[in-house]
Amino acid sequence: MKTERIIINPNPIGGLTEEYLMEHLESAAEYIKNGEVVAFPTETVYGLGADAYNVEACKNIFKVKGRPSDNPLIVHIASREEVNLLTSLWTEKAEICANNFWPGPLTLILPKSDKVPREVSGGLETVAIRMPSHPVAVALIKKAGCPIAAPSANLSGKPSPTEGEHVWRDLAGRVPLIIDMGKCDIGLESTVLDLTGKIPIILRPGGITKEELEAVLGNVELDKAIGIVNTENGGTDTFIPKSPGMKYRHYAPEGQIFIFSRGKLEEEMVSQNIYGDVARRIAVLCTNETEKKMNEELKNRLDYLYVLGSGERPREVAANLFEALRLCDENKIDIIFAEGIDERGIGLAVMNRLKKAAGKNKA
Ligand code: TXA
Ligand code: MG
């Protein structure tokens, strides 16, 4: 399949107006209306979208990504009215979440309406709904005139794409159109919040933090699957994760990841015996602060070094993490030493992705 790439200038003369976007997204909207799959930017990561009400189009998303069909899709909307068609129960907590965090990186799990195809919900009785804030995502949904079901636009098992170029590398030849508007602001996926029980449960930490949610909702819990990483000898989790996506090995680069804490890089490298083994290609992903303190001998031993940003600004680290993991693959890295950061705020999502990437169990 020939893939077209539309590049949207974030700062066109006259500004990124609705008219400008509508004009440039005309063919993309046509593809969606005709039941095709299109890749587009959101403020979190790029999405691979199709008309959420078109069963065949949604099935095609799974095919293009190589994604297991029991892993449900998020339905993206551009206006509040659309939730009434998608869920059979819009709760008070949902209203609070929408008022505070939409449009933005928060996905709400609610009981699904009959209108949501089972192919979208992965056979579950619930539906995941998110109103993105990225101008291209919003304009595309409006122009197509339907909610857009979309997972992240990576091949299954790869880190989510945070640049149009990442999507191009994964999906060129597999989709008719990729809309490219450069780097995504947040760089990690949305927070997935289950609102079907009494207490809201975070199924996947992401762009909206637990602290931000608690400030408006009161008590919010973390799903037990978060933070638990399957180990090589079969894993420690005996329960079934509520979010089907949690059970798959995700965000995985080819190399093996070791997470080190600030100040402990050399110790970790010595314990992995990398100085005596020149056959393996070694990468370090770390904060500015760690890079500044690294001695020359250690730096010279590295095949690849990526500075994620300041440890004082975890949102910077979040925005660069997936690109860093992808570049490790491009540099054919065998072993990755990645610096862990504080698990507060966005740090919880960063560490969740890093731990998952480090998990060796290919479920
Ligand atoms: O930021 C994002 O959320 C991006 C952009 C494109 O919006 N999308 C994204 O989609 O990350 P995806 O498919 O890669 O991840 C969706 C997650 C999966 O872990 C899936 O299992 C979970 O949400 N999910 C979807 N529907 C669900 C449901 N009804 N119940 C529980 N979990 C659900
Ligand atoms: Mg994904």
Image (cartoon, grey):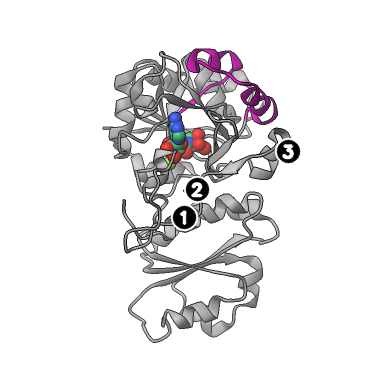
Identified at 54% across, 56% down, the residue is: 351
Look at the image and say whether residue 90 sits in the magenta stretch: yes
Residue 357: quadrant of the picture:
bottom left
User: Which residue is disc 1 drawn over?
Assistant: 228
What segment is highlighted magenta in the picture?
74-103
Secondary structure at numbered mark 1: loop
Mark pair 3, 1: CA separation: 26 Å
Look at the image and say whether residue 267 sits in the magenta stretch: no
Q: Earlier in the sequence, mark 3 or mark 1?
A: 3
User: Which residue is disc 2 drawn over?
Assistant: 224
Measuring from the top left, give residue 345's x and y in whole percent.
66, 50
Please, is residue 187 above or below residue 301 in the view? above
Identified at 49% across, 52% down, the residue is: 322
User: Which residue is disc 3 drawn over?
Assistant: 215
Nearer to us in this view, 103 or 140: 103
Of tags 2 and 3, the one toward the viewer is: 2
- Quarter holding the N terminus is top left
